[in-house]
Image (cartoon, helix red, strand yellow):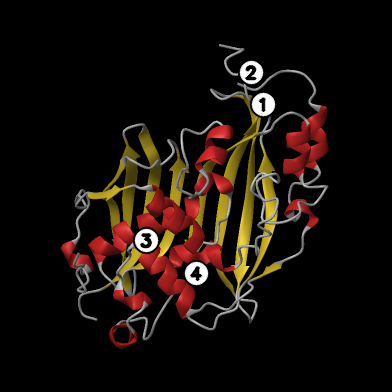
Amino acid sequence: MSRNATSKRFSEIAVGDEMPPFDLPLTATVIVAGAIASRDFMPVHHDRDYAIAQGAPDIFMNILTTNGCVSRFVTDWAGPEAVLRNIKIRLGAPALPGQILRFTGQVAAASQEAKEGVVELTIRAANELGDHATGSVVLALPLDEQ
Amino acid sequence: MAKDGPDPLRAGLETHIGKPLGGAGPASAPDEVNLPMIRHWVDALDDRNPVYLDADFAATTRFDGIVAPPAMLQTWTMARPRIEGIGARGGAAGKIAADNPLTTLSEAGYTGTLATNSELEFERYLRPGDRLQSSTVLEDISQRKTTALGTGYFVTWVTTYSDGDGEVVGRQRFRILKFRPGDAGEDS
């Protein structure tokens, strides 16, 4: 799939703007690949028998991957000049194989600093069980004259 | 809802607040920030932001060169896992220090663990060659609470990441619920 290599300008962004939703079809492979790429070897993220014995319905996505997917969702929208300042999430339902994890977001605030425009996004990642992660991301974009 | 009455378990744990979690010293990243691990992450997450791998493109951006995906911050200092026995250790990469308050809670019957909050802050983006250290401090242990999963305590710690010059590059605040499975709803 192609991603936009051009970045949003701060002047293009208004409070209330909706980000295009992003649907991530979760498979065991997606979950295991993210866990190992983030060097998280906890068996609940790759061993189904172990996860079930722990009371989980299946293996589930680790938090580093959730944060990575939030980051991807944000920069797929904002472009490569975006600088993330923070990712703050509250964790809920597990992200499981066989379900689509849908990312949605809106612009909650926008303010201009001396050298950058700062944008706060409200973010939600949900599946059929409910909210997997909800929270906010703050990022900085170049000002138009730069 | 907090329970009334003295709570000697929490009183004992309170002495750990503000101190390094588990008595461990700073953790050093086994490897410097590097392209192979960035590439592995980019492929696993299918994150095609070109500033992570495309040196020519990245040089045209305000990063002026390749940077690591910011959400990899925690990855660089993850402990090298001892795979043998990792399941029996509940997934811990290695031995857990005996005076870790999380171990104390587990031994007191609060064996369930549920992550509830993660807050990542980035002071600057990392570049290949950065060598990180992290240090983790126990920030808070809540009063005993009754939750939908069971009675338990919310435990919060903050990990601070620094570069080779000792400059802070980012932080993560992390909160979990340590709960006693199966006693949910006794107050409701």
- Do the residues indicated by labels 4 and 2 lie within the same chain of the protein? yes
Residue A85 visible in the displayed image = yes
- Comparing B59 with B123, the one in front is B59
Query: Which of the chains bears the disc numbered 2?
Result: B
- Give how far across and how far down residue B181 sits, in percent: 63, 25
Write down the residue under mark 3: B45
Assess whether mark 1 and mark 3 are in contact (beta carbons under 8 angstroms). Answer: no
Query: Which residue is located at x 63 percent, y 82 percent?
Result: B165
Label 2 element class: loop
Q: Position of residue B14 (x, y in %)?
A: 78, 40
**C-alpha separation, residue under disc 4 versus residue under disc 2:** 42 Å
Q: Are marks 3 and 1 on the same chain?
A: yes
Q: Can you identify the residue that label 4 sits on?
A: B123
* Front of the two marks 4 and 2: 2
Q: Which mark is residue B183?
A: 2
Q: Which mark is residue B180?
A: 1
Number of numbered callouts drawn: 4
Residue A81 visible (yes or no): no
- The answer to whether tags 2 and 3 share a subunit is yes
Residue B75 at what x, y percent from top left?
54, 64
